[in-house]
Amino acid sequence: MRFASPFPWWLAVVLVVGAAFAAYRAYARPIIPLSVRRRGVLMGLRFTVFLLLLLFLAQPVRLEPAAATDTVVAVLLDQSRSMAVADVAGASRMDAAVALIRDRIRPSLGTDFQVELLGFGETLAPVDLATVRAEDRRSDLTAAIDAVQTRYADRSVAGIVVVSDGGDTGGAGLVHPAGAPVFTIGVGAPEVARDREVLDLSAGQAVVDESVIDLSVSVVGHGFGRASFEVRVIEDGQLLRVLEVTPPADGGVLRTVVPVSPKPEIATLYTVEIPSDPTELVAENNVRSVLVEPPGRPRRVLLVEGAPGYEHSFLKRTLHGDPGIVVDAVVKKGQNDRGERTFYIQGAAERTRALASGYPTTREALFEYDAIILANVDVDLFRPAQVEMTAAFVAERGGGLLVMGARSFEARGWQETPLEPLLPLTPTDRRGVEVGLPDAVGSPHQIALTADGEDHPIMRLDGSGSETRSRWDAAPTLGNVASLGSPRPGAAVLATTTGDDAGERPVIAVQRFGRGRTMVFAGEASWRWKMLLPSTDQIYDRFWRQTARWLGADAPEPIMLRVEGGRAEGDPLRIDVVVADEAFAPVLDAAVRVRVTDPNGDAREMLATPVVGEPGWYAAEVAPSRRGVHQVSAVVDRGSNALGRADVAALVGGADLELTDPRRQDAVLQRVAAASGGRLLNLNDDEDIDDLAGVLRAHAIGEAAPTVHEMWNSLWGFLLVASALSMEWGLRRRWGLR
């Protein structure tokens, strides 16, 4: 018995004592003398009435536990294609799962619970054991569990039982919301007897026409020993190369790199396949494809030099030698007869007109570039508005900024300007520091790579990380290095120097800022790498070209089209379109029409809708029905004005992810179960399956709401009080009291 409106303990004691005292006072001195026994009887009846009334004021209730049979146990059966793999005593995983549910789970749970069978793969829906098939193209385990929680939101769920091989193409299996406990049962073999597989295929980015990029291929073979096998490389359906590979002795993954030259005008589809063996467990995982987009436009770089010198000449020449980079150069020469600054300007006529004063004066002109290099430039060269524009160029435009040369940091350098927070190293007060000649022979400033620098694309040279480090160790020294402060949070120091008494100092550092990237090169006379090394050594050219490309890599176009998803057939394509004007301010009122054309030429059109909280961002989604290369285009209008368009190719189903790594994935099943308070059960352990009913029953009873019976609001309560009052009244009358 419990109380719906309980009194505080001290009040209950006071009321009980008060009731006892009231009963005593009522018969302490009766009008007619009564024996002690009769007075005691009447006091007891009066006290009983008072006590019952106090008890009913506290509203006593009786709780009746709910029966476990009122709750649901959802049994989820994996019906994706991987369940058709026959590795359970000669039978398929689906056959083993059906037998388990039919012969053991349903008989064990059906007497205590409402057992409901649901199939999951691409969707979640009731299934019949007699007709279920392993045909779904993908499986999303966590989405299925979430759907169960929604499906039974108004019912008591004792638990969820998942029968699956653990394959999960939804990328989940890691996070699970609070709810009913999940008990997972794995079917299938934990190891593969005989199988060859293309585990991974990735490609570099084509940056210019006739680029040579690397296809990175990872293959593995199980159960074939060290027998060699073919790996075929196919370009747009045509056999390009055949590799004869031998697995490593430890049976691990074999990785190789294949150089290829993508087509310059259209996307190129590369496929890697292993000829199937009749004894293989799965043949569908022997092939993977990757799509390489054609080179984008060259990156536009603005190079501004504070004075003529060797550094400018060498740097401009090496950047001009890269077909993926277009350079506009400005060199401050001095002053004319009128005391005006004069500049040497070289570049495309349509852009250099905006450089007459040495630097662009409008956002539109500045934002035409993807990267800016300021070499030994004094802050006095710029007006305050130009400095602010440069900061916006990085933060809002998404461009790259490099401040280089020890002379850039003389005096107070860029301190207390809008550019100071952009620099990855905090600038120190360099007032009074003498900067040595950049062509000083025998300078002690030797470059030393950091751990971050060893793997960074700016510093990377041919070969491994250790080979890159040894080549930088052998590079000629710099002429001088500015003494700058510590790196900012999130910045990475790529190289240091320990050439003098100042100790280790950062010389190359990078960071992300807003949408763009920034870099500091605090050294002088990097041209010595070019002059003092053999002509065959390309360390200077490679470093500065990689730097320019890295700086401008993330600079967007006014209309940016990005497509994600489509990993498997039927997996939706998420299409994002970012729209900006010439000054790269977000366009909020654009009309964005998206067109998706499948490999058969069938097209679907739709309007992209604005993304809440992301100005200038529009999104659409489409579920492709075919595998292969899809052409996606976005046409953007603003009122009656056409703002432009963007086109991209997207690959759907580049790999059969459902059959990737066909082993039973116990780790995924364990994570899903543990995240919900359940556990992974052993298919072959009868006690595990038998114990399941008891665990679910305890959870169901503990979670289900009990039935509440109001004892105070009942006929029996009324009759009890009435009977005590009637007895007291009758005895009073019988014993002569009114």
Image (cartoon, grey):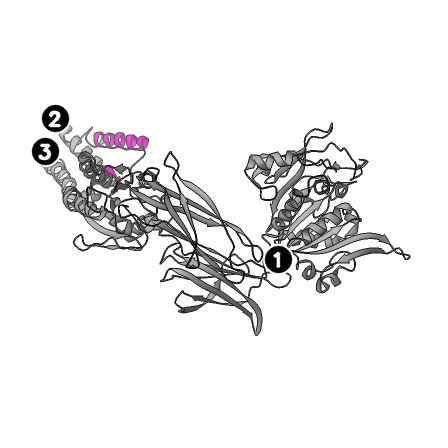
Disc 3 or 1, which lies upstream in sequence?
Answer: 1
Q: Please tell me which residue is depicted at 20% across the width and 28% down the height of the picture.
A: 28
Return the residue at label 1. Answer: 298
Give the residues drawn in magenta, as a range: 1-24
Q: Nearer the viewer, residue 257 or 460?
A: 257
Q: Is residue 70 visible?
A: no
Q: Quadrant of residue 137?
A: bottom left
Judge the density around disc 2: few (<14), some (14-19), many (≥20) Cα neighbours within 10 Å.
Answer: few
Return the residue at label 3. Answer: 735
- Of the two numbered discs 3 and 1 in the rendering, the one whose residue sits closer to the viewer: 1
Residue 332, percent from left and from top: 80, 52
Return the residue at label 2. Answer: 37
Query: In the rendered view, does 579 fall on the left or right side of 394?
Result: left
Judge the density around disc 1: few (<14), some (14-19), many (≥20) Cα neighbours within 10 Å.
Answer: some
Residue 3 located within the stretch drawn in magenta: yes
Residue 676, percent from left and from top: 32, 40
